[in-house]
Image (cartoon, rainbow, N blue to C red):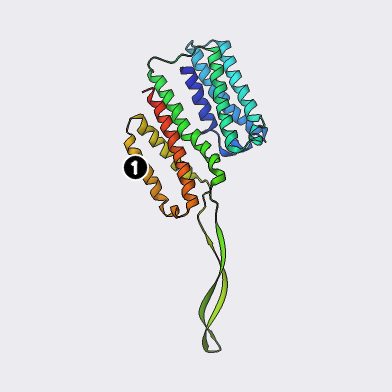
Amino acid sequence: MTLLLSLLLIHLLADFPFQSQRMAKSKQRKLRVLLEHLAIHSIGTAAVLGLFYQMDDVTGPTAWMIGGGIIVTHALLDGSPLKRLLPPALAFWIDQLLHIAILTGIVFFFTPVAWPVSFTLPEQILWVSVWGLIATELIGRGIAPLLAPFAPRLIESHFERKVTRKEQLDGLKRSVTHEVEDSARSYTTEINGVGRYIGLVERTIIVCLVAVNATGAIGFIIALKALARFKQFDDRRFAEYYIIGSLLSILGALLCGMAIRLAL
């Protein structure tokens, strides 16, 4: 179990915190970017397998087969046309589920993996780290493409208005009315760094509250987040978009928090 959790942690770290948006978007078009991404995975996977080899938990040939299987299958998935053929949200979730399923299958095939009767401290740390990254990074990245088709965009309207002002010409003062074109812009819901970090912190807090069985405080987090967008709720389309996004985020955090409680 410790080896499996360690490799899952490396996968999540390499695919999210250590993979920039630029790498994620261009690794299918640029071989150099794909190789950079695979190098990060390879270094992390080699470090974990090397540590377990030193502790005599895996043999040398087994470590090579596990590491080689993980990196080769990861390269095949990331280089496949899957993301170009499917809608972004479906492509993201299928891609991640395949990565995790294949990694788990390879480890199960080459090493015995049993559910522990009681989690040791290292297993608890790894379990919490894995589910914490799933809640904060994987779910957060996966919700964004799901909601993208429903997001209200920047609204800009043009209108004409009359402006009256006093002018002086040849010593005579008079009022002159002009018609001018003006524009009004509403908010935009384009994803930015601040919104992403708000969601990340929100899910982190909810996971922690569920893990320590303090679910009653979750309502305060939801209310605080809604307060910042109170004026925008006048727009029904934005309100619906905000509610479904928040519900998906909270549901993911609750499930991950419940999973963490299994090991504590």
Vertical relation: 12 (above or below) 241: above
Tally of numbered discs? 1
Identify the image quadrant of the C terminus. Answer: top left
Residue at 44% x, 43% y: name it: 198
> Where on the picture, by quarter, is residue 124?
top left
Residue wearing tag 1: 220
Where residue 62 appears, x then y in whole percent? 56, 12
Where residue 165 appears, x then y in whole percent? 51, 79
Residue at 56% x, 32% y: name it: 93
Q: Name the outermost residue toward the bottom.
A: 171
Residue at 61% x, 31% y: name it: 36
Q: Which is nearer the eye, 218 or 182?
A: 218
SS at mark 1 in the image: helix
Q: Which is nearer the eye, 259 or 44?
A: 259
Where residue 200 appears, x then y in whole percent? 45, 38
Circle 1: is it few (<14), some (14-19), or many (20+) Cα within 10 Å? Answer: few
Q: Amino acid at mark 1?
A: Phe
Vertical relation: 176 (above or below) 227: below
Vertical relation: 120 (above or below) 31: above
Residue at 44% x, 27% y: name it: 129
> Where on the picture, by quarter, is residue 80?
top right
Where residue 68 appears, x then y in whole percent? 61, 18
